[in-house]
């Protein structure tokens, strides 16, 4: 898997919050159902829903894997509708298709500058003295 950076606004937050709220409400329902032995399973399944919601936010590029787990455990917990909707949202989440360079997060003064060769048009970094393609010397300018 290629190494990509995901911005905070690119994460599946709606799926995460719906799943998280559904998991918490499911745990509360499980506590109420503890008198009927099924409550233990409902609590465990909803804890797993919350764990996979957290994994979804940590690794959003693997959203389909975490969405499948969320959907499975939301159904096994007694059809937790909020978590189920969150799982469906996570499965249709469209991650950013671009690789974001860590250099884009640097201040403008620290980003590497580029030069364009006047003879062949090759783009190089600022500290180059000669064009790597044609060998023409760059003029000394800042």
Image (cartoon, grey):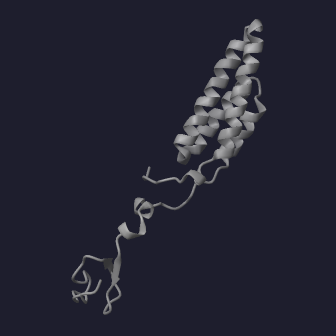
Q: Is residue 109 left or right of residue 126?
A: right
Q: Which quadrant does the C terminus fall into? A: bottom left
Residue 111 visible in rendering = no
Residue 96 visible in rendering = yes
Position of 4 relative to 24 (above/below): below
Residue located at (31% from left, 93% from top): 119
x, y percent for residue 39: 72, 13
Q: Is residue 108 left or right of residue 122?
A: right
Q: Looking at this view, is 32 or 141 the one in front?
A: 141
Image quadrant where residue 62 sits:
top right
Residue located at (63% from left, 39% from top): 67
Position of 82 relative to 109 (above/below): above
Residue located at (71% from left, 24% from top): 76
x, y percent for residue 124: 31, 78
x, y percent for residue 47: 63, 24
x, y percent for residue 126: 30, 77
Residue sticking out furthest to the bottom: 119
Q: Looking at this view, is 66 or 10 the one in front?
A: 10
């Amino acid at each position: 898997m290629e190494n990509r950076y995901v911005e905070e606004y690119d994460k599946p937050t709606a799926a995460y919050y719906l799943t998280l709220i559904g998991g918490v409400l499911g745990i509360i329902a499980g506590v109420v159902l503890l008198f009927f032995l099924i409550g233990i399973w409902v609590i465990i399944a909803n804890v797993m829903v919350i764990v996979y919601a957290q994994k979804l936010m940590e690794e959003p590029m693997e959203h389909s894997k975490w969405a499948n787990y969320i959907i499975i455990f939301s159904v096994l917990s007694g059809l937790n509708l909020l978590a189920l909707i969150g799982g469906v949202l996570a499965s249709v989440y469209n991650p950013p298709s671009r690789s974001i360079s860590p250099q884009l997060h640097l201040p403008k003064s620290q980003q590497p500058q580029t030069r364009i060769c006047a003879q062949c048009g090759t783009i190089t970094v600022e500290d180059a003295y000669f064009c790597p393609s044609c060998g023409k010397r760059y003029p000394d300018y800042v």
